Structure formats: C-alpha cells, structure tokens
Image: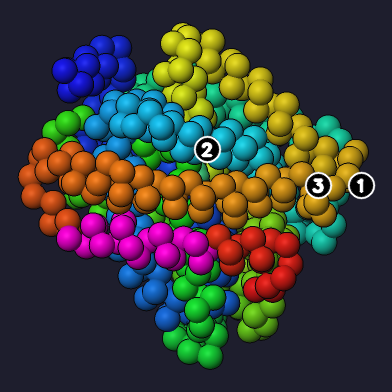
Amino acid sequence: MENEQLNTVQSNERNSFTGKIGFVLAAAGSAVGLGNIWRFPYIAAQHGGGIFLLVYIALALTFGFALMTAEIALGRKTGVSAIGAFRKLDKRFTFIGYLAAIVPIIILPYYCVIGGWILKYLTTFVTGGIADAATDGFFGAFITQPVEPIVWFLIFIGLTALVVLLGVNKGVERVSKIMMPLLVLLTLIVGVYTLFLPNAMDGVLYYLTPNFEKFSFTTVLAAMGQLFYSMSLAMGIMITYGSYMKKDVHIETSVHQIEIFDTGIAFLSGLMIIPAVFVFSGGDQSALGKGPSLMFVTLPQVFESMTGGAIIGAIFFILVFFAALTSSISLMETVVSFLEDKFKWKRKVVCLVVLAGSILLGLLSLFGYSIWSEVTVFGFQFLDFFDFISNSVLMPIVALLTCIFIGYIIKPSAVAEEVEITGKFKAKKMFYVVIKYVAPIFIVGILIFSVLEGVGVIVV
Ligand code: PHE
C-alpha cells in the first residue's frame, strides 16, 4: 500500500531527470562550487598538502560516499523532498526534515550575494578592466557601495530563479549539461596555462608534497568539514535531487561519478591557483590568504602580473560563475521543492515567493557591508553569521541526526534495498559501519571543532 502510494507520487506530475547523465551532472553541478575552487586549494595547502589530499580522498570514499548514498536513496525511495521524506519514513522524525530545510533557506541568499560579486569581476575582466580589478582598494570599494552590489546580486539571483522556474529537465538538467563540461574544459585551460609559468613547479611541490608537521587530528576534522560543504550534504539537496532520479539508475555508481567530479575539480583548482599565487608572491605562502581576499583581491593581482592574464582571468571568472550558478540553482531548487511538496502551490508562485524572500535576506547580507557595517550579530557580520550558523552548526547537526535515523531507526537496510533495485550494492558492509558508528563519532568531533573555531577558541 505504502509502495503503491509512493509510486503514484512519482509517476504523477513530479518531474524527473531524463537519465543517468542528467542526474549526475546536476548533482555534480551542486557539489562543484566556490568550495572547490576557492576554499579547497588553500585549506589543502595549509594542512599538509599531499597528506591532506590523501585524507580527503579517503574520507570522500567512505564518509562522503555513505552520506551521499543515504540522502539520494531517501529521496528516491520517498519521491519527495527532505521534510516529506522524513515524515513518510517515520512521522516522529519530521523535524529532521525541517532542520535540513532551514539550511538552504539561509545559504541561498548570501551565496547569491557572492555570486553577484563574481558577476562584477567577470564583467570587469571581460570588458578589459583588469587593471582596475587589480588595484588594492577595488574589492573594498565595491562591496561597501550601497547600490551596485545590489544590482549584481539581483542579476545573479534572477538568473538562478529563471532556471529553476523552467523546471527540473528544461532548466536544472539542461543548464548543468551545458555548464559542467564547459567548466571542466575551462579549468583545464587555466590549469595548464599556470603550470607553464616560470617557477610554477615550486607551487606545485608546495601543494602536493606531504608535510607531516602540519598534520594532526584537526586536519582530519578540517577535511571532514570541507567535504560536507563541498558535497552539498546535510541540507536536503541530495534528497531533493534523489527524488527526481529515475528508478533504473544505479545510485552507487552515480555517487562515485559525482565524487570523482567534485574531488577532481577541487584538485585541479589547486593546480590552477596555488602555483600562480606562488609565482606572483615569490613563494610567500601568506599570499594564499583566507576568506574572500584570495579570490577577489590576490587573484586579480596575480592575473594582472601574468602575460595573457587578462584572458586567463576572464576565463577564470567565467568558470567560477558556472560553478556558483549551478550550486545556487540546487539551493533554490531545494527550497522550491520543499514548498511545492508542502503547499502544493504552482511552481511559478513558489519561485516568486522564494525569490522575494531570498532577496530580502540577501539585502541584509549586502547592507552588512555597506550602510549597516557597524551592526554585528554575536560579533559576526550578517553574511559571516549566516555562514557560521548554517555550515558550522546546522549542517553537522542534520548530518548526525540523519546517520542516527538511518543507522538505528529505519536501519541501513532500508537504504540498501533502494540501492539494490538496480543491482549489487558493492560497498554495503562499509556503508553500514560508516553510517552506524564512524560517521556519528566524527560528526560530533566536527561540530565541537567548528563551533570552537567559529567563536575563536581554536585558531586554524
Ligand atoms: N557544494 C558547494 C561548493 O563546494 C557549496 C554548496 C553548498 C552549494 C550548499 C550549494 C549548497 O561550493
């Protein structure tokens, strides 16, 4: 009976990705974002280079694999987004769905604010304004203006809404199918170019040579935190995308493909950025910086100093734009999907409501840099506060609850059954162990670590 109901939900009006490639590229589109291009390279470099990479890959293949498989299976099994998915499986746990739903609602607006900054740089580079973009005060002067960042934010979020409005196949899938292969191509072009710069090899060695001195338990936790964010886990995205996945696609294989995409682009981004920054700074590691300054202040200067930098810089910001757009699409699609499932409103109406709400929240982040720059929330600027609450607090909590829910309430076999619809679940044993024991312990570690880091007790 339950199954019959689920099937009708799926075959009725609910959209689905047309096939395997569409699903994988859309999910990879969500996973590959600013986290891969801008955050991964410097985190890897600061945490022991090659050894960090090995740990990251090992975690991706175990922990990341288990959580992503679980989320996609929950979505496909129930045919609905997170809130409905938890409710269908066990009413008492609907609250996990609600908690998961809050995360993309918080992230979407500020992600689009950053998307707007990227558009500003893209247009500046494409129109030959590299010299301007490379001046010291350019970024600061831009984000503190009251009006211009709003315009770029509105364009970026408007584009996102347009794609989501077009629907799962005609919007999300089609855009991912075009943008993701282009993203790989552009990354390779920039990567190969920077590797041929004089002295680039010093940077490559710095990036890849294992440095055990910088390696400790906090490194593992940093890698876990990065992995979460990078694979778009613990916020209902993969549940939603799973709900659009056809029953004849093998979940395990798809997860491996998404992981290869995500980790591959993160790795290549390091090869594209670290040698270039090294050449520019004469080997000074502090130039890798932290926070927005690397992408928006240092890199434009690096491009300005290279031969052909105007073109390479323009290509770079185009690829970052693709990565950011497909990620923000997945955030908006997830929020839209919650509301569609919950209220059964038309997609158009839902899109407008989500757009309006996100614009209001986004303005808060924007004003935090301009007219309200004096205002802070618990010592954070608005944008940083939203980032902290979602990434450092809510996501680990949702991930932990998801593991407990699967490990002990519905049991890992419920996920295995869904995976096995299309064939063998090769890593089943590992999946059981990770979901029940390993992941919960590590996630508690990340939660404690990231809260302490956020409030300044630990300095990384
Ligand atoms: N996974 C994206 C990245 O690596 C970030 C992201 C998180 C995107 C959440 C959408 C939702 O940048």
Q: Nearer the viewer, residue 380 or 122?
A: 380
Q: Residue at x 56, y 27 (%)?
A: 159
**In which quadrant will I find the N terminus?**
top left
Residue 358 drawn above or below residue 73: above
What is the C-alpha distance between the residues marked 1 and 2? 30 Å
Amino acid at pointer 1: Glu
First in sequence, mark 3 or 2: give its number: 2
Q: Secondary structure at mark 3?
A: loop
> In terms of image quadrants, where is residue 310?
bottom right
Q: Earlier in the sequence, mark 1 or mark 2?
A: 2
Q: Are marks 3 and 1 in contact (CB under 8 Å)?
A: no
Q: Amino acid at mark 3?
A: Val
Q: Which mark is residue 99?
A: 2
Q: Is residue 447 visible?
A: yes
Q: Is residue 129 above or below residue 277?
A: above
Cα distance between the residues tagged 3 and 1:
10 Å
Name which quarter of the figure residue 306 lies in.
bottom right
Q: Using the numbered discs, state the Cα–Cα distance from disc 3 to disc 2 in whole angstroms.
A: 21 Å
Which residues, given as a range, are shown in magenta? 429-446
Residue displayed at 7% across by 45% down: 423
**Residue at label 1?**
374
